[in-house]
Amino acid sequence: MIKQLLAVSAFTVSLLVGCGGSATIDLNRVSEIATDSMQTMSARTDINDGDKAIEALREEFETKLNSSRPMVYPESYIAVTAEADGSFKGYSDVDNNHVQSAEEEELFKMELDSENQRVLASNPSGSETASSPFSGMMTGMLMGMMMGNLMGRQRSAGVNPAGRKANVQR
């Protein structure tokens, strides 16, 4: 049954990519789930390293994206990777192996804008962006380590999400 589901999902993605179309994902929900994942992480006390905090946030975010109802992206499993620039990339992981292959399309990029205290979720081209506020949840040592790590990665990569405006309507 699972193999049949994966085959149908792979066919659907191949068809969409082959026809020049692409499936869409609700960027507002992505930004809200990211904020919720950060809120969950703020209560954890078992992590004392910035890189481990980033990985724990990635796992929490991926789990919540895939378990949300209604589904954020019913076409396939959504895998999330933590990128070197401090962002998180979500892609359609049709074969659920956490390795993005050529036919597995990127769905979104999630970034933290600490200056404006918001989470940004954008489509791969960057033409659509949604945001969700995260003020008030920046308490605790873990959140401080995680934010410091992400902001350091952004600065190293020359990324400044503060200048972008959200253009997806709620």
Image (spheres, rainbow, N blue to C red):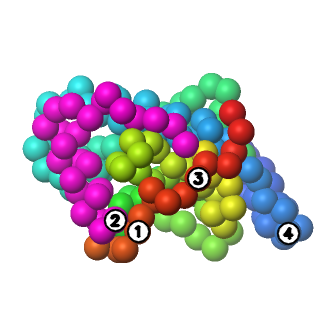
Q: For the residues carrying marks 2 and 4, which lies nearer the camera in this image?
A: 2
* Vertical position of residue 59 compared to residue 33: above or below: below
Q: Is residue 76 visible?
A: no
Residue drawn at x 74%, y 50% is 24
Could you classify mark 3 by the number of other residues whose Cα lies within 10 Å: few (under 14), some (14-19), or many (20 or more)? few
Q: Label 3 vs label 4: CA separation? A: 27 Å
Percent of width and height locating residue 144: 19, 43
Q: Which residue is labeled 1 in the image?
A: 159
Circle 4 residue: 20
Q: CA distance from mark 2 to mark 4?
A: 32 Å
Secondary structure of the residue carrying tag 1 is: loop
Badge 1 amino acid: Val
The span shown in magenta is 131-155
Between the residue at mark 1 and the residue at mark 4, the CA separation in whole angstroms equals 30 Å
Q: Which circle's residue, 2 or 4, is located before the other in the chain?
A: 4
Q: Of label 1 and label 2, which has the lower sequence position?
A: 2
Q: Could you tell me if the residues under marks 1 and 2 are in contact, i.e. CB atoms within 8 Å? A: yes
